[in-house]
Image (spheres, helix red, strand yellow):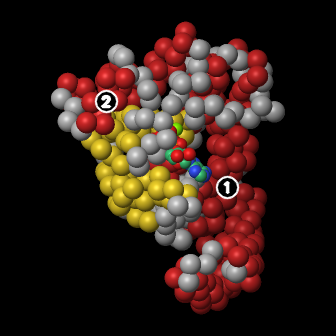
Amino acid sequence: MIDVVNLTKKYGDLLVLDDISTTINAGEKVVVVGPSGGGKSTFLRCLNVLEDPTAGRIIFEGNDLADLKVEINEQRENIGMVFQQFNLFSNLTVKKNITLAPIKIGVKNMRKVQMKNALVPLYNKCIQHFGHKLNQRVDSKRQALEKEIEQLDTALIPVTEQWEKTKVIKEKEGKSYATYDDKLTKQKLALTSKKEKKVRALSHTLHYEIKSLTPLEFNSKKEVKDRANKRADELLARIGLLDKAEVYPSTLSGGQKQRVAIARALAMNPKVMLFDEPTSALDPEMVGEVLDLIKQVADEGMTMVIVTHEMSFAKDVATRILFMAEGKILEENTPDKFFSEPKHPRLKEFLSKVAE
Ligand code: ADP
Ligand code: MG
């Protein structure tokens, strides 16, 4: 599912991730342990495209995340991330925290789907229901707009190519890309937004015409919202906090906040979940409720990468444990062997320090 290939990350001269390679398969629960400052958080942040690797690649389901064609936001939809400090929005209610991303992204995707994929099926449905005659209007509009979009497409390619070429040259010269790319970026963005407007117009025309002709229900913003609200209620019920839906996060305990943060991540139906020390900011009596929830989600088959200092939890939930120190994976093993037969001196030292 995720291939990490020679991943290296530097902050200035500081080498934080040193040529890391590993594969995370679907369904795996990979626990990452290691001393503070060893690069664990940076590793997760790279997986979630919150950091750009200095070198190496991350391939998610066959797509290289460094590829310009991979949309960062789309990638983040696939990955739920839970941070040590919850990172809930304090100005939004608990429920709104959970529905925020699904609604925003749901509406965006709805438009995208309408634009890109739904046109033909919608059109066919239209024909099915009303015969060809009524739809000739739609057809001619569609053709005209599609032609325009095609032209914009051809115009976009040279700009992108030129952009990428300059990027490579500038990077070879050791220059930061962000400082000189303004003109080309603007050009590219202008074209992209122009194209988007055209596509939207096309989608709108079709959507409007078809809607006015047919009693069939199509995806609407309201549907997206209703679905997100329903899902949020299910998740809140699941974490036992349905009665807290309308309160603000500041009124919750740490354990409750973290459970809401997990629910928020689950609301996007991610393919992978990343946890960065999800319990280390909690009072001890709240650790259990959060670990129990993570364990439940793990048992349901979710692929996970979990950074934690909770060794008995690691043993319990992990299919594989990585020991990360000084930016390297110094050792990895099944939970049993990891604890019973540590080989690397740094791991032996680490395990002797963390009392189980
Ligand atoms: P861990 O999560 O294992 O404690 P981190 O990935 O947070 O380790 O940090 C690894 C190293 O990278 C540390 O030395 C830290 O100070 C440094 N570091 C992390 N983020 C940054 C940053 N944004 N800028 C500079 N140095 C950073
Ligand atoms: Mg960390």
Among the 4 quarters of the image, the one containing residue 141: bottom right
* Observer-nearest of 259 and 96: 259
Give the camera-side residue of 326 and 270: 326
- Mark 2 or mark 1, earlier in chain: 1
Left or right placement of residue 294 versus residue 254 in this view: left
Q: Which residue is mark 2?
A: 349
Identity of the residue drawn at 52% across and 61% down = 13
Q: Whole-percent x and y of residue 258?
A: 60, 25
Which mark is on residue 108? Answer: 1
* Left or right for 312, reference 119: left
Q: Amino acid at mark 2?
A: Glu
Side of 196 relative to 164 (left or right): right
Disc 2, SS: helix
Q: At 43% across and 35% down in the image, what residue appears?
A: 35
Q: Quadrant of the C terminus?
A: top left
Q: Residue at x 52, y 20 (%)?
A: 290
Mark 2 vs mark 1, CA separation in Å:
50 Å
Mark 1, other Cα within 10 Å: few <14 / some 14–19 / many ≥20 = few
| Residue 137 visible, this angle | no
Spot occupied by residue 298 in the image (x, y as percentages of width and height): 39, 29
- The amino acid type found where label 1 is placed reads Lys
Residue 262 in percent (x, y) is at: 56, 30
10 Å neighbourhood of mark 2: few (<14), some, or many (≥20)?
few
Residues at badges 2 and 1 in contact (C-beta under 8 Å)? no
Label 1 SS: helix
